């Protein structure tokens, strides 16, 4: 069945770049999404990429898409303590939309 | 705009009790969904609605009922609460298919069933 997989934890130092990875199985997604969840809050749409693009840059965020390998990544440049959160990737699935398990990013001062 | 409003924020139920989690959105979104979030399992879709009067089951619908009598409201009913329903519940809405538009999420309801 469809699946979206992410590693559970990532720890980086403040000022370094963070790279959060995601693999998915459904190749029919028109868009792929990244959401951010801060403690005690709901998910917030962070960015997205159209499936016919390889890369999208949005200020400190860079999304890379490798359709052949079904691999999506989110790079956060100059990571700040305010970037500490759980990051979810999402793609289309049988139930319209499926989320990965989320990657908890911890930024060390 | 308030966006997606969920109430209550916290709730403790005894096994066998029933309750309704409320969700309202003021963005005139057609598509609304309920997810539950459990540690290590991401978000799983419980029920969704593509418009007023239309609902359908998601991945984990057992033990939950929904209705969509208006565009704005999408309540989730737990008929007879069980400890396995202890979770954080999120309501989300989208202008249309979230695969094309993404979701706006509520802030969640943390439910504990004892």
Image: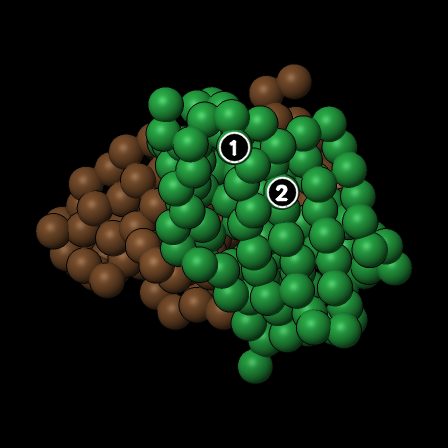
Residue drawn at point x = 66 percent, y = 64 percent: A71
Q: Quadrant of the N terminus of chain A?
A: bottom right
Figure quadrant of residue A53: bottom right
Nearer the observer, A29 or B14: A29
Pointer 1: what residue? Answer: A16
- List x then y, in percent, for residue B24: 55, 33
- Asked if residue B67 lies left or right of residue A68, the reply is left
Residue drawn at point x = 24 percent, y = 57 percent: B81
Q: CA distance from mark 1 to mark 2?
A: 11 Å
Of callouts 1 and 2, which one flags the residue occurring earlier in the amino acid sequence? 1
| Mark 1 neighbour density, 10 Å: few (under 14) some (14–19) many (20 or more) | some
Q: Quadrant of the C terminus of chain A?
A: top left
Q: Are marks 1 and 2 on the same chain?
A: yes
- List x then y, in percent, for residue A84: 43, 32
Chain letter of the residue beneath label 2 in the structure image: A
Chain B: its colour in the image is brown
Residue A83 versus residue A27 in the image, above or below = above
- List x then y, in percent, for residue A39: 37, 31
Residue B17 versus residue A78 in the image, above or below = below
Chain A: its colour in the image is green
Q: Secondary structure at mark 1?
A: loop
Res. A75 mark = 2
Res. B71 mark = none
Figure quadrant of residue A46: top right
From this viewpoint, is residue A37 visible? yes
- List x then y, in percent, for residue A32: 71, 55
Residue drawn at point x = 18 percent, y = 51 percent: B113
């Amino acid at each position: 069945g469809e699946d979206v997989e992410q590693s559970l934890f990532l720890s980086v130092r403040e000022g370094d770049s963070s790279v959060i990875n995601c693999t998915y199985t459904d190749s029919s997604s028109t868009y792929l999404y990244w959401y951010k969840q801060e403690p005690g809050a709901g998910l917030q749409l962070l960015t997205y990429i159209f499936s016919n693009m390889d890369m999208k840059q949005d200020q400190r965020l860079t999304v890379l898409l490798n359709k052949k390998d079904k691999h999506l990544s989110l790079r956060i440049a100059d990571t700040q303590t305010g970037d500490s959160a759980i990051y979810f990737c999402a793609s289309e699935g049988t139930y319209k939309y499926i989320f990965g398990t989320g990657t908890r990013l911890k930024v060390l001062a | 705009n308030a966006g997606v409003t969920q109430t209550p924020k916290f709730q403790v139920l005894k096994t066998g009790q029933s309750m309704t989690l409320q969700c309202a959105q003021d963005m005139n979104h057609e598509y609304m969904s309920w997810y539950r979030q459990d540690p290590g399992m991401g978000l799983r879709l419980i029920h969704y609605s593509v418009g007023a009067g239309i609902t359908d089951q998601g991945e984990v619908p057992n033990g939950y009922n929904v209705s969509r009598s208006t565009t704005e409201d999408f309540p989730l009913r737990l008929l007879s609460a069980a400890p396995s329903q202890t979770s954080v519940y999120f309501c989300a809405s989208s202008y249309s298919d979230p695969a094309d538009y993404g979701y706006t999420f509520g802030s969640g309801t943390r439910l504990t069933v004892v």
